[in-house]
Amino acid sequence: MASMTGNVTCVSVIDDAGFTQLVDTAGETETFILWFAPPEVSAFERMMHSRWVSLLREALVNGLPVTVIHPDGNARITNVQLGDLQ
């Protein structure tokens, strides 16, 4: 698994998709997929996606860093947390 820590510059949620964009301290920008056209979504996944969006919006509004975790070579997020990985 890979991770990126940075400041949120965008959170976009549409019908069946969610995306976010981060910029790290070196100025590198990356766009990540929160979810995209899932065939069926469990209640757990909906709650997890809602939590991610809430955390990302809080970070965007307050200028807080977030860390996203994703598979190597893949932009699909598996976890989001406020702050840096410890």
Image: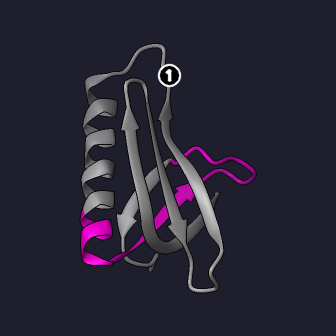
Q: Is residue 20 magenta?
A: no
Which residue of the protein is positioned furthest toward the bottom in this rendering?
25
Magenta span of residues: 58-77
**Mark 1 residue element:** loop
Which quadrant of the figure contains the C terminus?
bottom left
Q: Where does label 1 land, which residue?
A: 37
In the rendered image, which quarter is residue 66 located in? bottom left
Nearer to me, 72 or 16: 16
Q: Give the quadrant of the N terminus.
A: bottom right
Does residue 76 show up magenta in the picture? yes
Q: Is residue 78 left or right of residue 51?
A: right
Badge 1, how many Cα within 10 Å: few under 14, some, many 20+?
few
Query: At 25% from the left edge and 76% from the top edge, which residue is drawn?
Result: 62
**Which amino acid, mark 1?**
Ala
Residue drawn at (55%, 72%) of the image: 23
Question: Residue 49: x, y in percent?
Answer: 33, 40
Query: Is 7 in front, or is 78?
Result: 7
Image quadrant where residue 55 sits: bottom left
Q: Position of residue 65 (x, y in %)?
A: 39, 76
Q: Is residue 69 left or right of residue 49?
A: right
Q: How many marks?
A: 1
Location of residue 61 with respect to 25 vertically, above or below: above
| Percent position of residue 48, x then y | 31, 41
Point 30% across, 69% down: residue: 59
Residue at image position (31%, 49%) is: 53
Q: Where in the figure is residue 83, as x and y percent of width and height?
A: 37, 77
Q: Is residue 33 left or right of residue 52?
A: right
In this rendering, is residue 50 above or below 26?
A: above
